Image: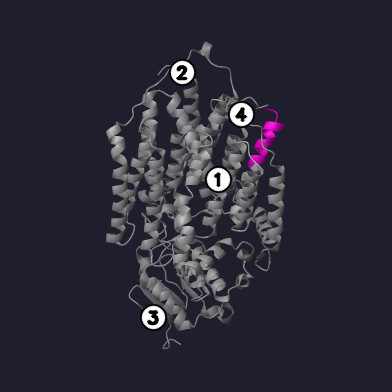
Amino acid sequence: MVYSKVADLRPLRLDTVAAICGLAIALALLPLRLFASQVYLNTVPIVLGTACALYLVSLYQEDDARTLPTLSSRVTMALPSVVLVGLAALVALVVVQEGRTPLFFGAASVVGTLLIGQILFASDRDLNPGLLLLQIVLFAFVFRFTALYATPGYVGIDIWTHAELTRAILTEQSLGAIADDKHYAAPFYHLLVAASALVYDVPIRLAIYLSAGIVMPLSVLLIYATTNLLVSARWATLATAFYAVASHVSMWGIHLIPTSLGLVFFLAMLYALIRVMRIEYTIRDFSLLLLLSIAVVLTHQVSTFIMLVLLLAAFVAQLVFVVGPFGLTRLDTSVFRAKKPVNLVGLVVFNFGLTIFVWSLTPYRQDSFLATVLSFFTQTLEESAGFLNIASGSTGDEADAATAADPTLLEQVVPYVDVLGFLFLLGATFVGCLYVVHRHRAEQSVFTLLLASAFMLVFVLGFPMFGIHNFIPTRWFAFLYAPMAILGAIGVRTVSGKLNPALVVSVLLLFVLVYPGAMIFAAESNVDDPVFSGQHERLAYDESELAAAEAIAELTGSPSGSEIRPDQRLYTDHPYQTVLTRTGAYPSTSTATVPDDGVAAHDYTVYRSTQSSDAVYFADENGDGRIEQISRDRLCRPDQATVYTNGDVTVCTPSPATG
């Protein structure tokens, strides 16, 4: 490894200063782990420091030409066939094993490794972007639709509500059927599914799969189109692969709700936004951008807010290049084409105005959506916000490993497995950001991606450190992965072109071998059948559990919530209680309180065998949720009567003899 002499070092530039500042920030953040135990506090500073160090090393190495090892033409030609055989094997595994088992996810990781390996190690002569994109899209389809095929009902929690809303629209043949719901002002998803059900003459479940389900895997092509406006086909394909296997992206291809469709429109808008910054656009291009932004507003509220953050980032990037103090106007046309910054003031003002107008008219909890969310945010700032107040936002990633008195090794490792893929992509993103801030490579488009990633990371990682979770940070990751995948591909491109070949090969092999598996084994990729079933709840149900929900509806007559007395409330685990509530089987259903080493004191309870084997949530005596496996007699006591059982699910009520 050859370094320049100190006397020959290049003068400090914006990217050099940024890398040095990044190292300083990483060192400053390291002590935070002494004050709070949180997976991101323990890992992000290390990732940031490593990325900045790699970039600085690349700056001060000689610029001599380097030859990296590539796959032989024979291997490159054979690998697509191997990938296709692997995808067929994944389908066969699901059919034979009747679900996505750990073996399935392990095999999918191998296929993902072969796919990304082709992109990084194929020679320029053998690289075939079209064939690679076909493999990526097929992988996305197989990985998502095998989950949908193997699940009798729906995957996820909110999907049950959206299915009922769509059914109401179809029944009344009018949007007025959901006039009291917040989705009345953002109905595009429900109208799309309802239209699909009518056009294809299929049930609502199949209509969801034939509309949003098909669009989600195809939407990864928008990442390719966006990235290809900035870099060559190899790196655009890499960004597409990064995005297609990302955990949260996979989840919204399985848990098909308005967030999924909002993500599709967001990706299309990101492409349209970068496009107008990279070409001599016409009014048609800007009209498309405007139309897509309206589509987001009419699809999903959280997606709308994220879109506004993107537009704000684009506007700030415009200011940097027009009235900013940096004077970033000189461009290296061999890297990015020179382009005058696009004026986005009108687009930003229009979307902020439209959003405020629509949200002011959106019904939500006896008030408007805008007033309600502002009230929630104000309450959070007054009652629970505080530096490193992260406990209130604990989720399935780490919540109950922290509550256990003596966590096992697996409980300590699983949170890091869940975020490993994100950390790999984050490291590549940091390198990509440092590359594009060089004044000769900077322009509005890449600064938009950089600022959008930074702003989103504040909402995803920054605000939760202060106990602010009102923005639902878990919904942001799939959107955040879009600019991260693009900048991450640019970061990998930077490393591969400037570092010592041995170090480059090590970094690339690490990405090829670890990234796909890390994303696939993360909790969000397998919500239908968790790999770590003792640490993550399963957000899908088998035939017996769905049959029990229907039986409860028949036994009780599906009364409305107002008809049920407080002492008649039904208690079971989370997430099973959400199915009974959201389908209307028994609206007054809550998470059972099961004291430590004690029994539940509720009169009406539902036990299912999953409660004794897998991760489900119960409340403790303090009202805090925790993952715990319990025996049947701790929820359905011997002094209760059994009014229904199918072997897997049992409904218990007060015994007539006791009464």
Q: What residue type is labelled 1?
A: Leu
Q: Do the residues labelled 2 and 1 touch (CB within 8 Å)?
A: no
From the image, state whether disc 2 or disc 4 is nearer to you.
4
Magenta run includes residue 372: no
Residue 338 - label = 4
Which of the pair 618/579 is nearer the observer?
A: 579
Q: What residue type is labelled 3?
A: Tyr
Between the residue at mark 4 and the residue at mark 1, the CA separation in whole angstroms equals: 34 Å
Q: Is residue 344 left or right of residue 43?
A: right
**Mark 2 — residue?**
63
Q: Residues within 10 Å of mark 3 (few under 14, many from 20)?
A: some
Between the residue at mark 3 and the residue at mark 4, the CA separation in whole angstroms equals: 71 Å
Q: What residue type is labelled 4?
A: Ala
Q: What stretch is highlighted in magenta?
A: 313-326
Question: Element at badge 4?
Answer: loop
Question: Element at badge 2?
Answer: loop
From the image, state whether disc 3 or disc 2 is nearer to you.
2
**Mark 3 — residue?**
644
Q: Which amino acid does label 2 sit on?
A: Asp
Q: Are marks 4 and 1 in contact (CB under 8 Å)?
A: no
Instruction: Answer with mark 1 or mark 3, whichever residue precedes in sequence.
Output: 1
Instruction: Quadrant for residue 472, please give it.
Output: bottom right
Horizontal and vertical percent for residue 625? Answer: 49, 61
Q: Do the residues labelled 1 and 3 touch (CB within 8 Å)?
A: no
